[in-house]
Image: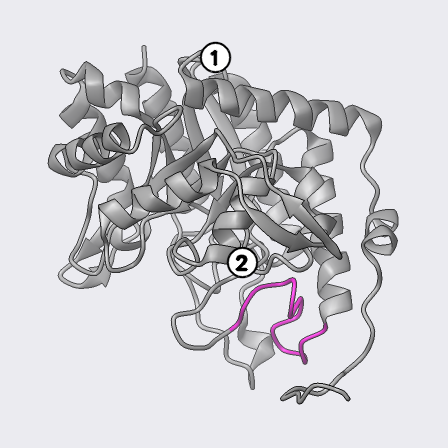
Amino acid sequence: MSLPTNYNILKKIPTTKEIIDYAPLSAKAKQKIEKDRKEVKNILEGKDNRLLLIVGPCSAWPEKAVLNYAEKLIQLEEKVNERIKIVMRVYIQKPRTTKGWVGPIIQPDPFKQPDLEAGMKYSRKMMVDVVEMGLPIADEALSTQNADVFLELLSWVAIGARSSEDQEHRIFASAIECAVGLKNPTHGSLKIGVNSIVAAQYNHISAMNGYEVETNGNQHAHLVLRGSNHGPNFSNLHLLEVKKHMEDQKIKNPAVVIDISHDNCLLNGKKDHLLQINNIFEILENIKDRPDLKKLVKGFMVESFIQDGCQPILTDQPEKINLNGLSITDPCLGWDKTEELILNLYEKLK
């Protein structure tokens, strides 16, 4: 007897192998990803004193602008890599508080109907193109069902604020080889944020790909502070609370990446993306005489694209969309401000 369902089958999607074969990765790029993953882990372990910087568009669309941004970023990376390890955000999945465009993997053209096959091909090819340029990339693990299509490309993975309390995402984090940053939940509890790290660092029995498996635990799972409904959470008091929770839970490789966007750049209840610039230097100033907190804070996350700000998607007026690197989700720092920020950060880290 078939089980009751509440969905309609639209079409069969390609296999993981078919999508990977559509946009294969070169042997040279595979070696580079292994090197980048190791360097990120070394930073989290404290073996590499560079600052980890996860930077790039809120959402990876449109492709031409994303690749244009990557070309700019790789040139800048060459100037600062002595002190800063840059990983580019190539986020293809977007969680929504209620509803809205959920990213190019589902809807590669926001003005057409969703098409998962087209979205997987679009996303895979774009990611491969960025990696082949020589940049390590990051993505958020929103849907874990098709993760195998993209995991081999990533040097850092995020578990978002709406997912980090979910057991499936915690098990997923425990099972992957990549360093993974789990965000504190939107309501802001730092204790629950650290609980997510505990869950990700330990082993779990689960069903995967038709097998009963035991995950090995991810010793490079760490916390991403992204603010809360109550406001920013990057002060020294917040960091000290995180440090205590991590010590109490005996977290391996205790580390924090601070997302200086999202609720960490709220001003009078409204997001101001320009505050990202002030935030990063305020944090560095706050911890400069606190070696315990400097040891804990391993990096930052910045939302940045070619143009400042963001734009709405007017589905009935596609001709009005700006395709030249203006975000269609959260507002981003434009390229000029991003470049200045990273160069100033490089100087600050002397």
Q: Look at the image and name its color scheme.
A: one colour
Residue 320 at x, y percent in the picture: 54, 74
Badge 1 local density, few (<14 within 10 Å), some, or many (20+)?
A: few
Taking the image as shown, residue 241 lies to the left or right of residue 208, namely left
Q: Earlier in the sequence, mark 1 or mark 2?
A: 1
Q: Name the residue beneath numbered marker 1.
A: 82
**Amino acid type, residue under disc 1 in the picture:** Glu
- Answer whether residue 109 is magenta in the image: yes
Q: Which residues are magenta?
A: 101-115
Of the pair 82 and 335, the residue shown nearer to us:
82
Residue 279 at x, y percent in the picture: 23, 38
Which residue is pictured at 69% across the width and 24% down the height?
32
Taking the image as shown, residue 8 lies to the left or right of residue 244, namely right
**Amino acid type, residue under disc 2 in the picture:** Leu
Where is residue 96, by image quadrant?
Answer: bottom left
Residue 213 at x, y percent in the picture: 66, 46
- Answer whether residue 18 is magenta in the image: no
Q: CA distance from mark 1 to mark 2?
A: 32 Å
Q: Is residue 119 visible?
A: yes
Which residue is pictured at 53% across the width and 72% down the height?
101
Which residue is pictured at 15% across the width and 18% down the height?
290
Taking the image as shown, residue 120 lies to the left or right of residue 219, namely right
Q: Is residue 225 visible?
A: no
Of the pair 93 and 77, the residue shown nearer to us:
93
Q: Name the residue beneath numbered marker 2.
A: 142
Q: Is residue 273 above or below residue 55?
A: below
